[in-house]
Image: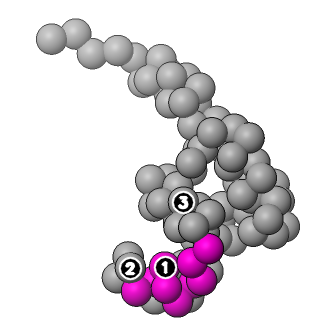
Amino acid sequence: MVQKPVAEISEKEKEENPFQLSDREREILQLLSEGLEYKEIGTKLFISPNTVKKHCINIYAKLHVNSKTQALRIAYSKRLI
């Protein structure tokens, strides 16, 4: 079996996920789009609301936004969710 160089894999991943959001961050974005609050998301994912908040801070930084509304707008327009 021939493996592709790491650089090629990284480029493909960048095309599919240009903001480099983790699977968990995408999952949280999806739940935010459904109108869930941090506490509800935390309960659903078995994590604390503070962990959800930290993920959201990371999401906003990666998307270069300052709010949930802005993050969801980009997520929809770029088909991240």
- Magenta segment includes 36: yes
Q: Horizontal placement of 1 versus 29: left or right?
A: left
Distance of label 2 from label 1 (alpha carbons): 5 Å
- Extreme-left residue of the structure: 1
Above or below, comparing residue 21 to residue 78 in the picture: below
Q: Amino acid at mark 2?
A: Lys
What amino acid type should be assigned to the residue bearing mark 1?
Answer: Ile
Helix, strand, or loop for circle 1? helix
Q: Where 21 sits versus 41, above or below? A: above
Give the residue at x 38% y 76%. 45
Query: x and y percent of residue 61 in the render?
Result: 74, 60
Rendered image coloring scheme: one colour
Q: Which element is circle 3 on?
A: helix
The N terminus lies in which quarter of the figure? top left
Q: Which residue is mark 3?
A: 30
Please tell me how crowded label 3 is: few (under 14), some (14-19), or many (20+) other residues with Cα within 10 Å. some
Disc 2 to disc 1: CB gap under 8 Å = yes
Residue 44 tag number:
2
Q: In the image shown, does 34 or 74 lie closer to the viewer?
A: 34
Question: Dot 2, crowdedness within 10 Å: few (<14), some or many (≥20)?
Answer: few
| Residue name at image x 60 percent, y 83 percent | 37
Q: At label 3, which amino acid type do we have?
A: Gln
Which residues are the magenta region? 35-43
Q: Which residue is mark 1?
A: 41
Magenta stretch: helix, strand or loop mostly: helix
Taking the view exactly as shown, the residue that stands out farthest to the front is: 34
